[in-house]
Image (cartoon, helix red, strand yellow):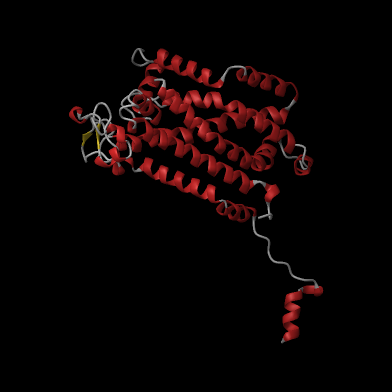
Amino acid sequence: MSAQTDVLKAGAGGLPLTAKRESLAADAFRRLIRNKAAVVGGIIVVCLVLTAIFANVIAPKSYETQVLIDNNKLPHWMTSIFTTMKPYAKYSSDYLLGADYVGRDLFSRLVYGSRVSLSVAFVGPIISLLIGVIFGSISGFFGGKVDNIMMRIVDVLYAFPLLLFVILMMAFFRGTFSHQEAGTFAYAMNQLDSRIGGMLFIFIGIGFTAWETMARLTRGQVLSVREKEFVEAARSVGAGSVRIMFRHILPNIVGSLIVVETLAIPGYIGTEAFLSYIGLGVNPPTPSWGSMISDGGSVIRTYPNQAIFPALALAITMFAFNFMGDGLRDALDPRLRGTQ
């Protein structure tokens, strides 16, 4: 019995059997869950997504309901934190975080405001990936004059300050499409923008100004991978350019591109908040954390809660995506495989 067990342990020919190595996905997931900051960030992001989906259930009031006689009212517990408000505070237990200057519930507006920030957080990277990956893949794969021309286009766009370019685009869209005759394309665009609270032009502005970096990254990755042995082997057996691109090159670079785009999400959220802060974001009364900070900033000395709470929500969301992106980058880095 002992001899038989030894043979089973040794394997055929007396060679020692080795344990089955875990897959790349399992190894990456193991490293990801060991990163406590990434796990916390992921949990916060999941909670934010659920909050945005079920906002109409979580929010006690509608984000646009105004009760003018309740303007600037506070719950009793808030004056123990912001003691300077005690002499002039108007109390009401109907508002968890207080009411704004026209009597709208701040907590409900914060909950609904998560929809705007998360919409930008997911739609912005999708647009950037679609445009940037296609543009960069064509440039890097074909090279030569095609590469030179396409990269010069990217260089020209890079010459413009990103935020200023977005502001100019938003001002152009809002000014051009605001008053148009019914039945025209511009009128249809304006109506669609109004139905989604003014977010259409934000998506267009951010998406069309954020793809340049993704295009350059994709081009560099394609230039590196297209010279690998497995690509040369595919060419030698007669594989066409389209097959090589979609079956051999893109699957090997898309992981790193997604991680890079995840790290860029806080920038998209910050851009939307800034646009709403200066009045080029969502249309009132659609709540955005940026517009709430702008409204609260005018009364921050007397009612600091109206600016601090949306600012905290914005900061926590951006930190959560940063932590999650850092964790994904570390987990998917092949150089760290088997080191933790």
**On screen, 146 above or below 24?**
above
What residue is at 35 percent from the left and 12 percent from the top? 179
Q: Position of residue 190 (x, y in %)?
A: 38, 20
What residue is at 41 percent from the left and 33 percent from the top? 311
In the rendered view of the protein, which quadrant contains the N terminus? bottom right
Q: Residue furthest right?
A: 13
In the rendered view of the protein, which quadrant contains the C terminus? bottom right
When asked about the image quadrant of residue 134, the answer is: top right
**On screen, 259 above or below 66?**
below
Relative to 91, 188 lies left or right: right
What residue is at 37 percent from the left and 35 percent from the top? 309
Q: Nearer the viewer, residue 270 or 79?
A: 79
When asked about the image quadrant of residue 89, the answer is: top left
Q: Nearer the viewer, residue 298 or 41?
A: 298
Q: Position of residue 168 (x, y in %)?
A: 49, 15
Relative to 128, 305 lies left or right: left
What residue is at 39 percent from the left and 36 percent from the top? 115
- Does residue 175 appear anywhere in the picture? yes
- Does residue 126 appear anywhere in the picture? no
Q: Residue furthest bottom?
A: 1
Q: Position of residue 302 (x, y in %)?
A: 30, 27
Q: Position of residue 212 (x, y in %)?
A: 60, 26
